[in-house]
Image (cartoon, rainbow, N blue to C red):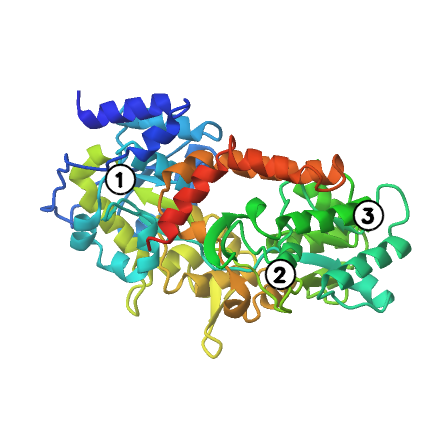
Amino acid sequence: MNKKIIAIIVAAVVVIGAVVGIVLGAGGNSNDDQNINFDIDLNSKIALNVLMPNSGKTIEEVNANLNAATVEQVTGYHVNYSQLPASNASSALNLNMIDQAQYHAMKLTNAQFGDMIAMDGLLALDEVIDAFGPAIKEAISEESWDVVRVNGKIYGIPERASSDNIENPVVFRQDWLDALQLSVPTTRDEFTAVLRAFKQNYCKEAGTAPLTFDMYTPLIYAVSASFGIYAEWQEYEINGKKEVRYYMDAPGYVDYVSYMSDLYNEGLIDNTISTNDAATALQKFTTGKSGAIATSLWSVSAIVAGLESSGVITATEAKGTVEDYLCYLRSLKNAAGEQKVYRTSGYTYITAIPYYMAENAGYVIDWINSKLTDTADKHNFRTIVLGEENVHYTYNENKDEYAPVSGKFEEKDDASYYLTGSNENVYTKYWLARVQKNPELKRAWNTLMRNADEVGVYNLVDFAPPIADYSANRGTMELYAQDQFFVMLGTDKGTSKFSEYLTKLMGTEGGTAATQAINAWYYSK
């Protein structure tokens, strides 16, 4: 039996067992069975079979989508799309690899890419990109290639996020602040004072509280920033030595939890945060049960709709900016009086080729190369992302700005699903058309992104290649840290048991192994 098939079968079996760390650490990625055909006729294109992430739609709808037709139009390749199931996607992917399913390319999550690397199941792409991907090499930065480079070889096409956004604000009711003659807080003392004023004047009844958020938001970045915690993984200087730590192991985390616990015990935080989903938290904010919400920038459109539905604003007001009703806290000041805050980035998906499909890899790379081409003569990427000028979007040459055409731009809502890599040189500029779909969303984005390069702090692992001990422990660590935050607020009423929880995080929950592996990677760069 082919040794790669044996490796995949073994890895798929043991990945759920106790020896997962050993298996993931052992991936050699030798790819000694490459049979890439470099002598192909690109004027006679083959049909491609591509495995995609679950879309929430039927596979018939995926293949019939207008954006799929656009990709075929600009590339000349007909693609037969398949998709992974909504649940147990990684298990299904493993079985596909064992069966040598005939997919020319696979659009994978970062975790799935890491699993495939560990199984030695992917094709090294350096030579085929050199031969068939000149536009790919122009469109993707060296920083991005580092994310998919293992043992010196490239194993995937990274799809970088469309824009590096500051997108986790605390949203306040501006009309409440105005009525109380208060401003958006900039310090913890001011933040506490605002919440107390909201409680005294607007949140007196049961079921109301000044600040709400959902169960998936243990780290309120606008607040944790004041304790020097800006991202899940960041570098700290501790006793004169620099090291990367997870946020629950950060020097300021226990103080952050103590502060949040004090707010909770004083009734300034919604007492159902440990069970709130995002919709519930939004509903509380838009119906006046809370005057502040820690949420995502991308909830702004839903907030505006909710305020309209609740009668807070009129339909006419909802079509414009609503600065009289909403305002945004990006971050409180840290101990040095600076504003720093988490800036999202990273890679949404990575497109890879199974090692056993090496023969036709040239066609796949040519297909992706065509998709990322964006020159003065050929705007393939723009056409995929934005559509047709004066049909889906308009262009303002003076502002170098793209704006959506209402009623037609909605056809491009699914465009990103069909990307396999992104043109990093132009994607953000095109993507900003989406921000303009809602005037208040655009205002919020502009507010949060002010001097973003100076205040934004990245999550370091957003730019990491597959790291075995981190991949193996990430899910467990994240769930544990989330759960213990709410335990400390709701059950412990403080941080009396924090050292016990941190010991468990770093021990049985895999924190020490993950931290050591991430530091080894980061300081080897």
Residue behind mark 1: 353
Q: Residue furthest bottom?
A: 398
Identify which residue is drawn at 58% across, 35% down. 480
Decide if residue 143 is on the left or right side of residue 498: left
Could you tell me the amino acid type at mark 1? Ile
Residue 95 placement: quadrant = top left
Which secondary structure, mark 3? loop
Apparent side of residue 311 relative to residue 397 in the rendered image (left or right): right
Name which of mark 2 and mark 3 comes first in the sequence.
Answer: 3
- For the point 59% across and 68% down, which residue is it? 446
Which label belongs to residue 143? Answer: none
Quadrant of the image for the N terminus?
top left
Position in image of residue 276 (x %, y %): 70, 39
Q: Earlier in the sequence, mark 3 or mark 1?
A: 3
Dot 3 corresponds to which residue? 209
Foreground: 506 or 265?
506
Q: Quadrant of the C terminus?
A: bottom left
Q: Residues within 10 Å of mark 3 (few under 14, many from 20)?
A: many
Q: Which residue is denoted by mark 2 in the rendering?
A: 441
The disc labelled 2 sits on which kind of residue?
Leu
Residue 63 position (above or below residue 253): above
In the current view of this chain or complex, which residue is farthest to the left? Answer: 39
